[in-house]
Amino acid sequence: MNLDEQLDSFVKQVGKTIPNDAQKREMTKAGADVLVDRLKTATREKHYQQGRDTSKVKHLADSVDAESLDETDQKVGYETAEASGINHARIARLLNDGWKGHPGDHFHSLALKQAEPDVFKAEQAEYQKITGGDD
């Protein structure tokens, strides 16, 4: 095998390990799902109010969802976990960061930090499932 054939073989081998946009979406969706679970759990532990009327507006813990980040109708292959619904993102930020006279408890920031290893593991497992490799 000459050098050109060896390089072509190498490029084909390496190319199989680089995910395309659809595969990136699958990987980041797996990570976002883990993050959503962690954020919901953290929100329920710190700020859930039993007996609250949720017939009109969902509770903050129930409004955390994974959404695709599609910029200008192009699939970019990334997912995010965020609070959806009326004022939920603003309320989450206020509870996390605090305001004058009410210190924040940083539940959101801590949940993000603590979820990092599990999010990475979920994305890595999805990557290995997609590529069929160990690396």
Image (cartoon, rainbow, N blue to C red):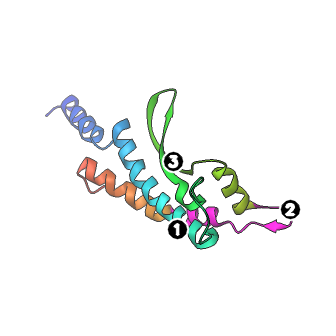
Screen quadrant of the N terminus:
top left
Whether residue 3 appears in this view of the structure is: yes
Q: What's the amino acid at mark 1?
A: Thr
Residue bearing the label numbered 3? 80
* 35 left or right, relative to 10: right
Q: In this view, does 5 lie above or below 48?
A: above
Please report whichever mark, 2 or 3, sits nearer to the chain's N-terminal start.
3
Q: Quadrant of residue 55?
A: bottom right
Which residue is drawn at the image coordinates 36% and 56% (left, top)? 124
Question: Could you tell me the amino acid type at mark 3?
Answer: Thr
Using a 10 Å C-alpha cutoff, classify the residue at mark 3 as few (fewer than 14 neighbours), some (14 to 19) or many (20 or more): some
Q: Tell me the distance, in whole angstroms, between the alpha carbons under discs 2 and 3.
A: 29 Å
Q: Please tell me whether residue 80 belongs to the stretch shown in magenta.
A: no
Q: Give the range drawn in magenta.
A: 98-115
- In the image, residue 107 lies at what x, y percent? 64, 66
Helix, strand or loop at mark 3: strand
Q: For mark 2, does the 10 Å Cα neighbourhood hold few (<14), some (14 to 19), or many (20 or more) residues?
A: few
Q: Which of 3 and 31 is in front in this view?
A: 31
Which quadrant of the figure has residue 10? top left
Residue appearing at x 86%, y 62% in the figure? 100
Give me the C-alpha separation between circle 2 and circle 1.
26 Å
Residue that numbered label 2 is attached to: 100
Q: Position of residue 75 (x, y in %)?
A: 43, 32
Q: Which amino acid does label 2 sit on?
A: Lys
Which comes sooner in the sequence, label 2 or label 1? 1
Labels 2 & 3 near each other (Cβ < 8 A): no
Query: What whole-number distance in Å separates the C-alpha atoms at marks 3 and 1?
Result: 17 Å
Residue bearing mark 1: 41
Where disc 1 sits, the SS reads helix
Quarter holding residue 14 = top left
Viewer-nearest of discs 3 and 1: 1
Locate residue 68, reporting x and y percent. 46, 41
